[in-house]
Image (spheres, rainbow, N blue to C red):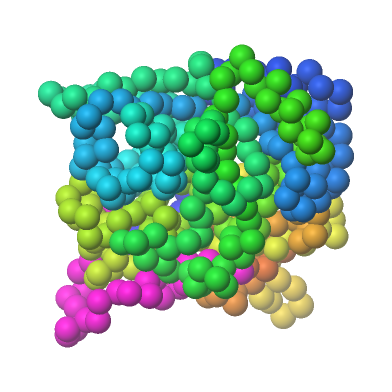
């Protein structure tokens, strides 16, 4: 078995931006990069923007996200049969999320899901790829798939509420509440740092994006950038496919069985691997939060290698590569922080350093997925396991 972790994160879970937001014309706007290209990273005062978002009164331009719609009488039962989520009885205006997995159980697409009674709306970072895959899978069923990204834009709000029938289509982030049929590797829902993060995405016609933002500003909500929303996401340990997932990621490694995977709903692509790792094996890697040493004013880039520390008689040096950084943020209270994926074997109290262009940065880790790789409801073993049983087939 090998658990070597690649230093670079393959860009397999994101697509180039199709739209540059008109809100980038605002004074002070600094354009985002990578998966957040096309919208503003901040508007000149990221600390004040984070504080406004944390107080529950701000609006975030999320118009770089994609929207795929599925219509037709078979839409929910069909999506249920090919993705990780239980959708057959999904009530209108109730939010959930799903994953599309490879036959080996690796994450290929992720999407927020809400149905309005006639259309299922999928909010995703890979609308072209997801729509293409869905069209290949529809066979003779009564469904129609449309990449509606050109027509709809998302606005982020720090609100913990589903959309009402008289409101626009709204997806409320279910993280970190463990859904029926899901399970968790990390802390209990009410002890999870994500429990304090309220977040939803409101879909508005793309040609009304500026007007919808202005209406919220008129009500006293400032416009803030992705610096603020990403810092809040890191604080909440919330995985994002374009950042935390690479071509080998299984959902267990990111504690994504909480909200995106139903373990008893029946067969779907990748289901056998999900069940095997949950029941018998252990995820080979685990998500951690890193508290970075900010004394040198150095921040690593996503994809930077994470090393363990080799202690000598008078010094300590970076040792072997044990993982990679997936998201980096400068939080207004926590300081420089990051999410990273590391080998399961890395001790929970182990000292780590992260590479940067100007040198190594010390990092203290906060455990998200425990090193024992056992969920809270894993079935008890009936006897000794044969060596290798339950290991992920890609390892």
Quadrant (top left/top right/bottom left/bottom right) for the C terminus:
bottom left
Residue 57 higher or lower than 194, as above or below? above
Give the overall secondary structure of the magenta segment. loop
Of residues 90 and 133, the one drawn nearer to the viewer in this rendering: 90
At which x and y percent is residue 135? 26, 23
Residue located at (12% from left, 23% from top):
140
Relative placement, left or right, of 205 versus 121 is right
Displayed quadrant of residue 344: bottom left
Residue 307 higher or lower than 60, as above or below? below
Residue 79 higher or lower than 64, as above or below? below
* Residue farthest along the bottom direction in this orientation: 383
Relative placement, left or right, of 10 versus 219 is left
At which x and y percent is residue 297? 84, 52
Of residues 67 and 90, the one drawn nearer to the viewer in this rendering: 90
Quadrant (top left/top right/bottom left/bottom right) for the N terminus:
bottom left
Relative placement, left or right, of 49 versus 312 is right
Residue located at (21% from left, 39% from top):
77
Residue 84 higher or lower than 131, as above or below? below
At which x and y percent is residue 343? 46, 63
Residue 144 in view of the camera = yes
Of residues 89 and 146, the one drawn nearer to the viewer in this rendering: 89
Q: For residue 392: magenta?
A: yes
At which x and y percent is residue 165? 48, 36
Q: For residue 105: magenta?
A: no
Residue located at (29% from left, 66% from top):
278
Residue located at (70% from left, 57% from top):
337
Residue 319 in view of the camera = no
Q: How many marks?
A: 0
> Which segment did they paint magenta?
366-394
* Residue farthest along the front direction in this orientation: 166
């Amino acid at each position: 078995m090998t658990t070597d972790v690649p230093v670079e994160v393959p860009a397999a879970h994101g697509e180039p931006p199709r739209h540059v937001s008109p809100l980038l014309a605002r004074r002070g706007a600094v354009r985002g990069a990578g998966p957040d290209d096309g919208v503003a990273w901040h508007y000149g005062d990221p600390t004040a923007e984070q504080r406004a978002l944390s107080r529950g009164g701000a609006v975030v331009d999320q118009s770089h996200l994609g929207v795929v719609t599925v219509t037709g009488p078979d839409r929910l039962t069909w999506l249920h049969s090919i993705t990780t989520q239980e959708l057959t009885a999904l009530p209108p205006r109730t939010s959930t999320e799903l994953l599309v997995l490879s036959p080996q159980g690796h994450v290929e697409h992720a999407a927020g899901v809400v149905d309005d009674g006639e259309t299922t709306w999928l909010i995703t970072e890979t609308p072209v790829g997801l729509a293409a895959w869905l069209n290949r899978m529809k066979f003779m069923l009564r469904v129609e798939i449309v990449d509606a990204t050109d027509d709809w834009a998302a606005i982020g709000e720090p609100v913990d509420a589903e959309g009402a029938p008289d409101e626009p289509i709204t997806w409320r982030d279910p993280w970190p509440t463990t859904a029926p049929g899901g399970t968790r590797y990390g802390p209990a829902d009410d002890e999870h740092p994500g429990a304090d993060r309220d977040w939803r995405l409101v879909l508005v016609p793309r040609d009304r994006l500026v007007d919808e933002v202005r209406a919220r500003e008129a009500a006293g909500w400032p416009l803030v950038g992705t610096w603020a929303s990403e810092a809040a996401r890191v604080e909440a340990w919330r995985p994002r496919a374009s950042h935390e997932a690479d071509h080998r990621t299984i959902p267990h490694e990111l504690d994504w069985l909480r909200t995106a995977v139903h373990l008893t709903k029946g067969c779907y692509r990748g289901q056998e691997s999900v069940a095997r790792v949950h029941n018998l094996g252990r995820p080979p890697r685990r998500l951690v939060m890193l508290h970075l040493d900010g004394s040198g004013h150095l921040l690593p880039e996503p994809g930077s290698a994470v090393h363990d520390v080799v202690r000598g008689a008078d010094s300590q040096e970076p040792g072997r590569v044990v993982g990679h950084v997936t998201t980096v943020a400068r939080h207004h209270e926590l300081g420089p922080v990051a999410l990273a994926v590391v080998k399961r074997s890395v001790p929970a109290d182990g000292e780590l350093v992260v590479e940067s262009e100007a040198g190594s940065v010390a990092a203290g880790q906060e455990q998200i997925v425990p090193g024992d790789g056992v969920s809270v409801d894993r079935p008890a073993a009936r006897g000794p396991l044969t060596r290798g049983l339950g290991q992920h087939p890609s390892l």
